[in-house]
Image (cartoon, grey):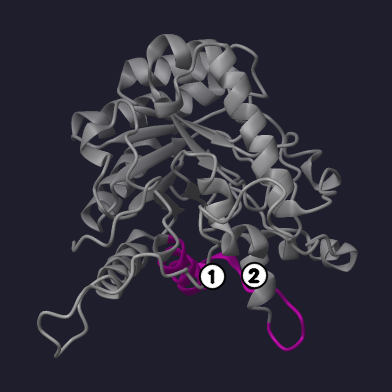
Amino acid sequence: MPSGSGHPTRDARVHGLPELSGTGRTLVMGVVNVTPDSFSDGGEWFEPSAAVSHGLELLGEGADILDVGGESTRPGSSRVPRDQELARVLPVIERLAEHGATVSVDTTRAAVAERAVAAGARIVNDVSGGLADPDMGAFVAESGVAYVAMHWRGHADVMDDRQEYGDVVADVRDELGARLAALHDVGVRPEQVVLDPGLGFAKAGALNWPLLAHLDALHALGRPVLVGASRKRFLGHLLADPAGHPAPPRARDDATAAISALSAAAGAWCVRVHTVRASADAVRVASAWSAARGASPVGSPGTSPRSTALTSTVALTTESWTAGEQDLPTWQDSGARNDDGGGPR
């Protein structure tokens, strides 16, 4: 895959993932849901053998990371007991790791994260950013594992009631900044952390677009950014039919690939997707596009490279984003909250 022009946070070192740090491109994380009730593919890969086969298929399509989860976080879903979550994910993680996959465990529980890392997971992907389990930060600090901290305001049964923002971009940035500080206070090193804006989590449909369009607001926090837009409800509403019926989850994959390309062009470290091949191609296109923007004009040998200070059309520059210097519009739209938001996992 061709490398694009460098990006300071996309190419930042992530502790414990040397082969996935500084690659010069956006990574692709493939979703392996070991659940009966996930919003897009619940039950399809519920049996461990089916989940392992699916994970290997995603690897063959170009996934850099496999994200194994045993608890749905779709809006309104109920929590599963810890032992049940462990029974779902551990055999899948063990077998995928044996095949050489870089595995992430999608959990909010420190006890599950600890067992998963012992089984071979190298990343903990916590949708609560450490808020759901007070022991999570200490485990991450002690283990040194790579850690994805997502913006979160509550579990699935309450999150749709917690989507009031003054300015969604600034508020999410500031709340993630607070999580970084809190994690640091319990010993988590900055280089362990990847940030996730939490698309669809306590965010109605219209609130997700400004976060995507202004990823550099999150880059200003100095850590890599993971984007998880795949098949979420805000895409379903964008692609609604003339009668207003949202597109079903599997009909959102083309739009997901478009977001993968735009996120990669904006410097995302990784995109988390259900269908890998299209997004792997999309980030490859974005990488070539970005490289061409910094190259000499075709047909003009010896011409100086174009300025690397060109501002992306899909993101604010990190340099221009400092507290108090951006007069962003308020993205809160009370009418937009009726579209059910962007459904998570």
Residue stretch rendered in magenta on the structure: 241-263
Q: Name the amino acid, label 2.
A: Gly
Q: Is residue 296 magenta?
A: no
Q: Which mark is residue 236?
A: 2
Residue 95 drawn at (x, y percent)? 26, 30
Q: Which mark is residue 252?
A: 1
Q: What SS does tag 1 mark?
A: helix
Predominant secondary structure, magenta span: helix
**Of 276 and 334, which appears nearest the observer?**
334
Residue 156 drawn at (x, y percent)? 73, 39
Label total for image: 2
> Crowding at label 1, few (<14), some or many (≥20) Cα neighbours within 10 Å?
many
Callout 1 touching callout 2 (CB < 8 Å) = yes
Q: Name the amino acid, label 1.
A: Arg
Residue 201 visible in the displayed image: yes
User: Is residue 252 toward the left or the right of residue 49 in the image?
Assistant: right
Quadrant including the N terminus: bottom left
> Crowding at label 2, few (<14), some or many (≥20) Cα neighbours within 10 Å?
many
User: Is residue 215 toward the left or the right of residue 47 in the image?
Assistant: right
**Of 22 and 310, which appears nearest the observer?**
310
Residue at x-position 56% and y-position 47%: 218
Gap in angstroms between the C-alphas marked 1 and 2: 6 Å
Residue at x-position 43% and y-position 42%: 224
The quadrant where residue 343 appears: bottom right
**Of 130 and 60, which appears nearest the observer?**
130
Residue 84 drawn at (x, y percent)? 55, 23
In this rendering, the answer to whether 202 lies above or below 49 is below
Residue 49 drawn at (x, y percent)? 32, 38
The quadrant where residue 295 appears: bottom left
Q: What SS does tag 2 mark?
A: helix
Determine the residue located farthest toward the right in the rendered image: 334
